[in-house]
Image (tube, grey):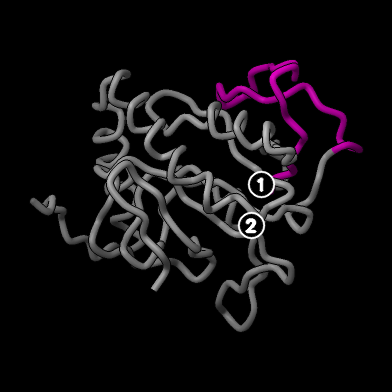
Amino acid sequence: MTPSHPTEQVTSAERQRLRQRLRRARDEIDPLTVAGNSSIISAQLLPLLSTARTIAGYLAIGSEVHLDDTLARCRERGQITCVPITRPDHTLLFTPFDSATTLTVNRFGIREPVFDEQSCLSATSLDAVIVPLVGFDRHCHRIGMGGGYYDRTFAQPVGGRARATEKQALLIGVAHEVQYVEQLVPDWWDVPLDVVVTERRIVYRQ
């Protein structure tokens, strides 16, 4: 049976309330289900990443989809894996990451590698980016944590709208199905994802 989902017409004023509701829904998922969903999502991600040479993921916190297995499998195939580093200007750099990388905890309580900025990669060096999210819709619009890091990193504002950077990596969102809403109203700076993968389906941008 097809799951029912709320229809959301989101204005800027309502966005924070929606974000809080979706985070609560995600955080109510028990750890065993998070692990099971993450395994299913990993199996669906790997074919989408097959032609990428350099892949960025992230280090999950709480009930976010976990990518440890996905990134390890990519490295087994000879692909370079990276994770994001937050910068003071609210953009991201990406540092190479593997099982031997030393980790620390940043000011947001998120694990980050101990890194040398000279070894970091820019967004234009990436072939695919796996993006965390709080909510998404059928058009692959994304609502995140509210910091705007991914939007600033992967967009250039042109004529009042966000345009993808010139060399655009494949942007893949990963989420639990409970994070889906029928429709989000994006802000002008929001960069849509190319595809979103959940434990139940793959949603391509329409």
Q: Which residue is mark 1?
A: 90
Q: What residue sits 26% from the left and 27% below the top?
A: 29
Residue 154 is inside the magenta segment: no
Q: Is residue 160 left or right of residue 89?
A: left
Q: Relative to 196, say whether 176 is above or below.
A: above
Q: Residue 183, which numbered label?
A: none
Q: Relative to 80, say whether 165 is above or below.
A: below
Q: Which residue is mark 2?
A: 152
The span picked out in magenta is 91-119
Q: What residue sits 40% from the left and 32% below the top?
A: 38
Label 1: which secondary element = loop
Tell me if mark 2 has few (under 14), some (14-19) or many (20+) residues whose alpha carbon lies within 10 angstroms of its own: some
Q: CA distance from mark 1 to mark 2?
A: 7 Å
- Identify the image quadrant of the C terminus: bottom left
Residue 194 appears at what percent x and percent y? 50, 63
Residue 39 appears at what percent x and percent y? 40, 31
| Residue at the farthest front position | 77
Q: What residue sits 55% from the left and 27% below the top?
A: 68
Q: Is residue 148 left or right of residue 89?
A: left
Residue flagged by tag 2: what amino acid is it? Arg
**Residues marked 1 and 2 touching at CB (< 8 Å):** yes
